[in-house]
Amino acid sequence: MAQLEHYIHSDEIHPIDIVESVAAHHDWDFDRLADDQIAMQVEGQWRSYSLTLQWSPREEVLRLICTFDMDPPSRRLPALYELLNLANDQVWEGGFVFWPEQRLMVWRYGLVLCGESLAAPEQIDRMIGSAISNAERYYPAFQMTCWGDAAPVSALDMAMAEAYGRA
């Protein structure tokens, strides 16, 4: 990411401009929807994830939502909600919610940039990376709970932990 800083010359840069630079650096497909909003697709191991980042100047928050389709059977919704609570207890930098009307699983995060703080490209890269890695980590647990009839606690055991070191 240090190479990205060479493309950012102004102290007055808009947070979405930085997001756009990060997306271009990674060669992700993106679309600048408005001055304050960008959408992109990122390919994961399990599926493609749709990400939208929006800058709210009034609240001074850069919001990220990462979504993927999920249409669980109605009878499994209580188990899914239990799993969401268990998963959210394990993460600190965001959280999952299920939007039943849209049939979407959502990872949400807000980066507070109050007092005219600027987001660093590394922060935004980490923010996006965290969304994707958590979606990838918990996706199998969501699947096992919704369609494999696994108990939420058992499904959570399947959530892949981060690997450290080399084989």
Image (tube, rainbow, N blue to C red):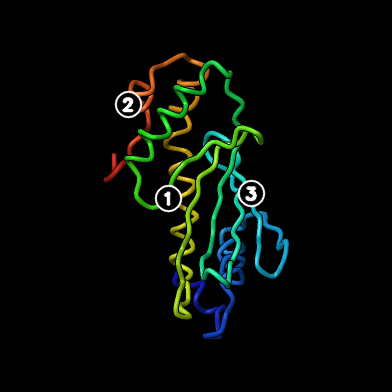
> Which residue position holds label 3?
41
Q: Position of residue 18 (x, y in %)?
A: 56, 70
Return the residue nearer the eye: 7 or 146: 146
Q: Which mark is residue 157?
A: 2
Cα distance in 3D space between marks 3 and 2: 28 Å
Residue appearing at x 58%, y 72% in the figure: 57
Query: Is there CB contact under 8 Å for labels 1 and 3?
Result: no
Cα distance in 3D space between marks 1 and 2: 20 Å
Q: Position of residue 93 (x, y in %)?
A: 38, 53
Q: Of callouts 1 and 2, which one flags the residue occurring earlier in the amino acid sequence?
A: 1
- Quarter of the image containing the C terminus? top left
Instruction: Report the amino acid beneath label 3.
Output: Gln
The 10 Å Cα crowd at callout 1, few under 14, some 14 to 19, many 20 or more, is: some
Specify the quadrant of the image occupied by residue 104: top right
Instruction: Report the amino acid beneath label 1.
Output: Gly
Cα distance in 3D space between marks 1 and 3: 19 Å
- SS under mark 3: strand
- SS under mark 1: loop
Query: Is there CB contact under 8 Å for labels 3 and 2?
Result: no
The 10 Å Cα crowd at callout 3, few under 14, some 14 to 19, many 20 or more, is: some
Q: Position of residue 73 (x, y in %)?
A: 58, 18
Q: Is residue 110 above or below residue 21?
A: above
Q: Which mark is residue 94?
A: 1
Q: Which mark is residue 23?
A: none
